Amino acid sequence: MLGYTITQWLFGILSFMAIMFALMVVFTRNPIHSVLYLVLTFFCIAGHYLLMNAQFLAVVHIAVYAGAIMVLFLFVIMLMNLNEDTEPQKTMITKLIAGVIGGLFLLVLVGALKGTEQLAITKYGYSEAGLMKNLGRVLFKEYLFPFEIVSVLLLAALVGAIMLGKKEAKE
Amino acid sequence: MAEFILYKSIICVVIFALSLGIAAYSTWWERKFAGLLQDRWGPSRAGWWGLLQPLADGGKMLWKEEIIPNVSNKFLFVIAPALFIVTAIVAGVLIPWAPDLKIGETFYSMQISDVNVGVIFLLGVTSIGVYGIMIGGWASNNKYSLLGAIRASAQMISYELAMGISLIALIITAGGTLSFSEIVKAQDAGVANIVWQPLGFLIFFVCALAETNRAPFDLAECETELVGGYHTEYSAFKLGLFLFAEYINMFVSSAVMAGFYFGGYNFPFAAELYQALGLETGDWQISLIGFLVYFTKVAIFITTFMWIRWTLPRFRYDQLMNLGWKTLLPLSLLNLALTVVVEFFRGNIHL
């Protein structure tokens, strides 16, 4: 089709959708809609993982990000009941400052990424690295120590969060 | 390629129709079974033994007036039931319904897709399932709906943890595979996983009840507190889809339990029986018998779900959360530890 393979078409469509939904996350007024657009973005990214034959990563991405984290986001936003009436209106000067800072950040990012050499991306659909078996081997053999450190870090964060939550309840 | 597409299309259509048919007749059986338990008839007017009742119900849902609250977000309001039923059906793609069928020289698996990370896929789909309820509850712009939606999502998130951990223990027992068909195949020696995972199965079963929002965990639609819960504002076929999806969920989770813990299409002395009948691997008779066996197990599970619904009263919300976090989660961790020890002594884990 027009000189492109199906994979390339899928890549193009998924990328377009991912970027569009990501923009919608920022531009939509309603926070609930933002969350839902973000979920759609995650689905598009999971599609990219599938194209790279990283099935495990794709499914975990959906289960963890779309299925757990975003549900919690949605949960909190629904409970806070944000809408345009109760939201504090920002003044022009805040918006201006935010714009300048955002622009500067973009400049820094572009400057930092411009000179970097392009990473060699594994060819779509052929790599076996993302399959569960290979990923598990690499994680538990070559990167066992960092893996354990990360889990301890997560545990510490978990315990910390519970402690913070408990302290508030007592007061 | 064309043959592959044809075969996959046929199996997709068959399994889709099967899910819908089973869900429809689950509603009939639920009412009939409730009648049995409460010493009354249940549906008996539409057709012989009330067998046309699902059609009558469906027709009623279709022709009722549809009301969309005009302050709600219309798009999300309409999309929510569809989302809910789609996620309910999607989990069904993993289920291997029967032993492979041989036509000509090729073996055809009786499964839509053998995802090699099937178990995680299943967890992912279950966790996506909550969006239908949440979006529906929120878009209704009604306090009761919102409360129902929040209850449902909190419940699903809480019970997913214990469910996931009990599945890890199952995977260890099943020999480290995440593919549904391989988990079922590994049980064909005659020993079902339930023998090594009794506690894991119990945890999974309770979590499945909670994940499908069935009694005694149906707090999301608790009539006495929340009117109709998350589907208070829904009418006509949208309400029908929500109710229908619950039965599909029940069907799929029954099939998952029957496959994971009770051997799916395998049964004791299957090989001997096939040998006595003179059947070879791939014969259609084997597939048929396997399918019927699987189906019987699923039917038993669905009936158990209903039996529980008409026997146990509803939990209180704090009891629900306590059960999930303080009982099932530690129990599932204990089960995981026990499984590792047992499997080590069985020689299935190599250091």
Image (spheres, rainbow, N blue to C red):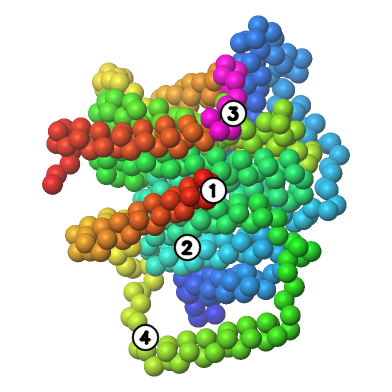
Crowding at mark 4 (Cα within 10 Å: few <14, some 14-19, many 20+):
few
Q: Please give the name of the residue rendered at 65% of the width and 6% of the height, measured from the top-left corner.
A: B39
Residue B169 is covered by the magenta coloring: no
Figure check: B100 above or below A115:
above
Q: Which mark is residue B316?
A: 3
For the residues labelled 3 and 2, the Cα–Cα distance comes to 38 Å
Crowding at mark 3 (Cα within 10 Å: few <14, some 14-19, many 20+):
few
Q: Amino acid at mark 4?
A: Gln
| Mark 1 or mark 4, earlier in chain | 4
**Picture mark count:** 4
| Mark 1 or mark 2, earlier in chain | 2
Q: Chain of mark 1?
A: A
Q: Are marks 3 and 1 on the same chain?
A: no
Residue B316 is covered by the magenta coloring: yes
- Read off the magenta span: B309-319
Q: Chain of mark 2?
A: A
Residue holding disc 1: A171
Between A112 and B275, the one lying in front of the other is: A112
In this rendering, position of residue A152 left or right of residue B50 = left
Residue holding disc 4: A118
